[in-house]
Amino acid sequence: MSRSIILVDPLPRTLDLIMEPSVRARLEALGDVVVSEDRPMSSDEVERYLPDTVMIFGQTDMPRERLDRAPRLKAIINVESNFLPNIDYQACVERGIWVITPASAFASPVAEASLAMALDLARGVTAADRDFRQGVERYGLEGNEETFRFAGAPVGLIGFGDLGRELRELIRPFRNTVRVFDPWLPNEIIERLDCEPSTLEEVLRESQVVFVFASVTSENQGFIGAKEFAMMRPGAAFLLMSRAAVVDFPAMIEAAQSGRIKVATDVFPDEPVAADDPVRQANGVLLSAHRTGGTRDAFYALGSMAVADAELIMKGLPPRLCRRADPATAAMLRSKPVSVS
């Protein structure tokens, strides 16, 4: 009987990063695991194993002609978390090959950090700390001239996937009115979670706090620019938590430095950010080094979700934890590959 090969080509992830020993043991119980972690797996290696490969963990290029040489392939599990344009997604659907990602493992930690950053912008926590250390602190009401209460403040969400829905649940105790702009979703889904379907303009004009959780697509790169920032309420907070390319990044920084709005960002056009990048000195901007989702437990969740669904697939059952790539939407995604874990 031929071997059942599982190709593991996970860079920038590694198995130690995403799998506890017990989870890795479950993976190895599914077949003969061939791993390349110090470099992307070479084409020669991939081609050698393709005829007996039943599963791929990673971001290996799989165009249609390569899929033709993998007759036993059941699943491609992307542990990088972005659906990249290196797979023929339509061919996979036609052949019953699952293409999935456990990206939702990052939703809870990103939502938690997003709330923390929003509270900081609203109440001026780190700004007050810096003032105190410099000896220019202000007390009582004077120290709150530029702050607002997050509780009860109208909130806007741009993008209502895993991240947006997790944040929505997290802020329920704050009793916010929540408006959502997501052109990929029907109103019924938005309304089911006690949110108001809204246009982009309504979200920007009516919200005191705006969270951006949208993925980058061929249709929305840079779709929030100077005109959109000018729509926002004076003193409102804008938090960029998904991908930098959905906004005109220089326009966002300019809006913050003008003092008209407050900005927080966890993502940048180029990462790591250059040491001399002006954003490091930008006033009115709360900076985070693309770290909100990268917690120890989230990385382990990537691995455990992936292996759990792999076990189901090997039994002939559908995956239950990971998100499946849809050819129509995957073709529109334009996220940069992750380079740092």
Image (tube, grey):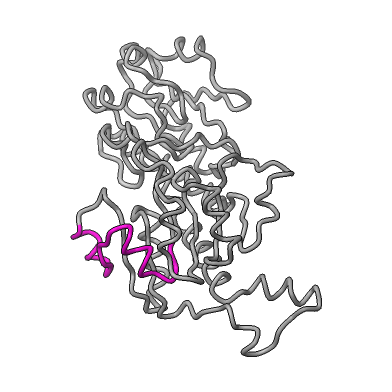
Vertical relation: 251 (above or below) 191:
above
Vertical relation: 253 (above or below) 24:
below
In the rendered view, does 148 fall on the left or right side of 4? right
Magenta stretch in the rendered image: 187-210
Vertical relation: 252 (above or below) 148:
above
Residue at the spot 33% in from the left edge and 12% down from the top edge = 65
Residue 203 forms part of the magenta stretch: yes
Along the line of sight, the residue nearer the viewer: 312 or 161: 161
- The image quarter in which residue 187 lies: bottom left
Outermost residue toward the bottom in this view: 140
How many labels were placed on the picture?
A: 0
Residue at the spot 81% in from the left edge and 78% down from the top edge = 135
Q: Quadrant of the C terminus?
A: top right
Q: Quadrant of the N terminus?
A: top left
Along the line of sight, the residue nearer the viewer: 225 or 70: 225
Along the line of sight, the residue nearer the viewer: 85 or 108: 85
- The image quarter in which residue 101 lies: top left
Residue at the spot 60% in from the left edge and 23% down from the top edge = 39
Residue 181 forms part of the magenta stretch: no
- The image quarter in which residue 257 lies: bottom right
Residue at the spot 53% in from the left edge and 74% down from the top edge = 122
Residue 12, given in percent of the width and then of the height, sits at 57, 34
Residue 107, given in percent of the width and then of the height, sits at 44, 55
Residue 276, given in percent of the width and then of the height, sits at 73, 44
In the rendered view, does 133 fall on the left or right side of 336? right
Vertical relation: 121 (above or below) 244:
below
